[in-house]
Image: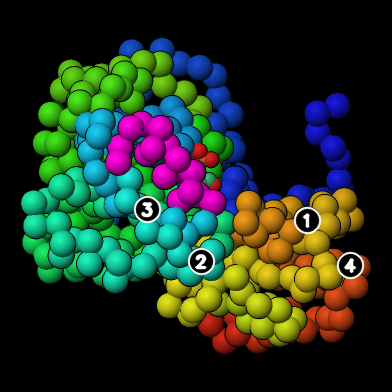
Amino acid sequence: MDYVYGPGRNHLFVPGPVNIPEQVLRAMNRNNEDYRSPAVPALTKTLLEDVKKIFKTSSGTPFLFPTTGTGAWESALTNTLSPGDRIVSFLIGQFSLLWIDQQQRLNFKVDVIESEWGEGAKLDVLAAKLAADTDHTIKAVCIVHNETATGVTNDLSLVRRILDEYRHPALFLVDGVSSICALDFRMDDWGVDVALTGSQKALSLPTGIGIVCASPRALEASKTAKSLRVFFDWKDYLKFYNLGTYWPYTPSIQLLYGLRAALDLVFEEGLENVIARHKRLGQATRLAVEAWGLKNCTQKEEWHSDTVTAVVVPPYIDSAEIVRRAWKRYNLSLGLGLNKVAGKVFRIGHLGNLNELQLLGCLAGVEMILKDVGYPVKLGSGVAAASSYLQNNIPLIPSRI
Ligand SMILES: Cc1ncc(COP(=O)(O)O)c(C=O)c1O
């Protein structure tokens, strides 16, 4: 048996993959189709147009790769850079660490700017590096918008301001895997050159689509970038865009219809309402953590993430035990602490197609687990803090007004 049954729905609160809404599941429940028929290019055209809206770009060119966030990273790097290129990258947690590892293995010279886990990117160090780089040897600045391992969100508008201040031409490459379509993200306003995300995060789809969006400058860079690339080459897609058939290889029909349904749900709610809902979910979770007397891994308010909260446990508790118990006893899935913060934090993912009452169920579960593992929590304290905030802040459901 490959599925271990638990009654009711699994409370899936890992920060991706997230719950898939019924509408999306139904939309994907269909047969394969000939992707060379006129129907699939027509569908793809709408997807490419609409995906741009969640990146907030009108000038960007989107690509839908059959891949994950990791593949999207590789596509962003190899299409815009050449081996030996100097890049600046921020190490603030497990996902930025993995991206840096990929950058190094692709033979870029990486200036790593490291922060304590729980802190945001050190932008003052970036400013100093750009100021000193009068010959423009830095070809790209790479940053993870929302570090999913620690619940830290970086201020991208500030990165753009620093690049502009020094009139530095470095490309601005952004991992928006756990931010795009949940947090405020503005590709054009912030002059992002390549932005990327994965389908299993805020879009609430199965894993399997890596969405990459390239600015005109990034497309231009791709014409001379010498990094080896085949499967992730933008050129192949552009050729098929021009032919009006869109796909250089066989797309997953089911995922395309799923993406259509997922985007429809986002637009029905309204992207700004989606972002506001994530703000409420983030704030409610933080209030619960505070009421439990526990600390947020994120060191400062300015970095608080509205898609994931990493909760620090007291030293006498193993956070992995919390995650184990959550699943074994309460049919609740929480995120493990990764790498440097393994055993020290557990993570509550609050992103995607999720409402406030679902979150309260998760918070109630966490309280019981904390008590199970010997932490002196008052049952109901976090739920009360979260629900009194939510009761004052939840608007009417936009489509039911
Ligand atoms: C911020 C961030 N970037 C990249 C990745 C890697 O994505 P994937 O696991 O889809 O390859 C993740 C995965 O959780 C992530 O959270």
Q: Is mark 1 on a helix, strand or loop?
A: helix
Q: Mark 1 points at which residue?
A: 320
Q: Name the residue under label 3.
A: 112
Q: Where is residue 24 in the image (x, y as percent from the top left)?
A: 54, 41
Circles 1 and 2 in contact, beta carbons < 8 Å:
no
Precedes in sequence: disc 1 or disc 2: 2
Whether residue 95 appears in magenta in the rendering, the answer is yes
Query: In the rendered structure, which segment of residues is drawn in magenta?
Result: 94-109
Q: How far apart are marks 3 and 2 (CA)?
A: 13 Å
**Residue 337 as seen in the image, left or right of residue 398:** right
Q: How many marks?
A: 4
Q: What element carries label 3?
A: strand
Quadrant of the snapshot with the N terminus: top right
Name the amino acid type tagged 1. Answer: Ala
Foreground label between 4 and 3: 3
At x 30% / y 22%, what residue is drawn? 229
> Given the current orientation, which residue lies at the most extreme front position?
132
Q: Where is residue 37 in the image (x, y as percent from the top left)?
A: 33, 14
Answer few, some or many: residues within 10 Å of disc 4's Cα (few below 14, many 20 plus, some between 14 and 19): some
Circles 4 and 3 in contact, beta carbons < 8 Å:
no
Q: What element carries label 2?
A: loop
Q: What element carries label 4?
A: loop
Circles 4 and 1 in contact, beta carbons < 8 Å:
no
Q: Name the residue under label 4.
A: 373
Q: Distance between the residues labelled 4 and 2?
A: 28 Å
Name the amino acid type tagged 3. Answer: Val
Q: How far apart are marks 4 and 1 (CA)?
A: 11 Å
Q: Name the residue under label 2.
A: 116
Precedes in sequence: disc 4 or disc 2: 2
Name the amino acid type tagged 2. Answer: Glu
- Of helix, strand and loop, which mostly describes the magenta segment? helix
